[in-house]
Image (cartoon, rainbow, N blue to C red):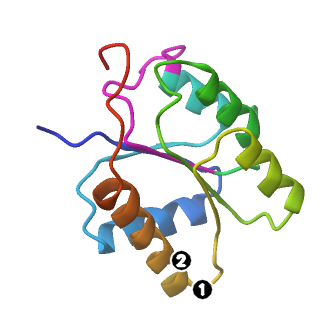
Amino acid sequence: MLEPPILLVEDNPDDEALTLRAFKRSNVVNDIEVVRDGQEALDYLFGNGAAAASPPPALILLDLKLPKVDGLEVLKQVRAHDNTRLIPVVILTSSHEDSDLIATYGNGANSYVRKPVDFNQFAESVRQLGLYWLVVNEAPPMVNGS
């Protein structure tokens, strides 16, 4: 059986490349689907665009500062729908604002990770995220037959 994908919601091409490189170095076997704005993420998750997620992602890595629809609104919509509310959502951001930290946890984020500036630290953070959320964590069964 194929592993469900990881959804990376990231508008910065450099951060996207670093994340993909870090996952590759960590030997993560899941495909990584990349969307570059909040609306594209919602379309991917809920089928409002050309390609809806099937199967749903095993993990969503979500930046906060996104074009079209910000990451907090994406998180709120993910948590509002039965077929996505149990997907782990990790906020992966450069924001150091306490208000962002409080708002994301208050809206159901599973984790909040600040992006390190150094690539080796960033790669290690991504490796640990992958190891924990894809291997160690016991995920609930998906609802609605997903």
Please tell me whether mark 2 sits on a helix, a strand or a loop.
helix
Q: Amino acid at mark 2?
A: Phe
The residue beneath circle 1 is: 118
Q: Residue at x 45, y 17 (%)?
A: 50
Circle 1/circle 2 CB separation < 8 Å? yes
Residue position marked by numbered label 2 in the rendering: 122
Q: Which mark is residue 138?
A: none
Q: In percent of the image, x 46 and y 77: which residue is there?
A: 123
Indicate the position of residue 31 as horizontal and vertical percent values: 30, 47
19 relative to 51, above or below: below
User: Please, is residue 44 above or below residue 23 in the view?
Assistant: above
Q: In the drawing, does residue 107 fall left or right of residue 138?
A: right
* Residue situated in front as seen by the camera: 102 or 27: 102
Residue range (magenta)? 46-62
Q: Is residue 112 depicted above or below 76 in this figure?
A: below
Pointer 2: residues within 10 angstroms few (<14), some, or many (20+)? some
Q: Position of residue 118 (x, y in %)?
A: 60, 85
Crowding at dot 1, Cα within 10 Å, few <14 / some 14-19 / many 20+, comes out as few
Q: Is residue 69 visible?
A: yes
Identify the amino acid type marked 1: Asp
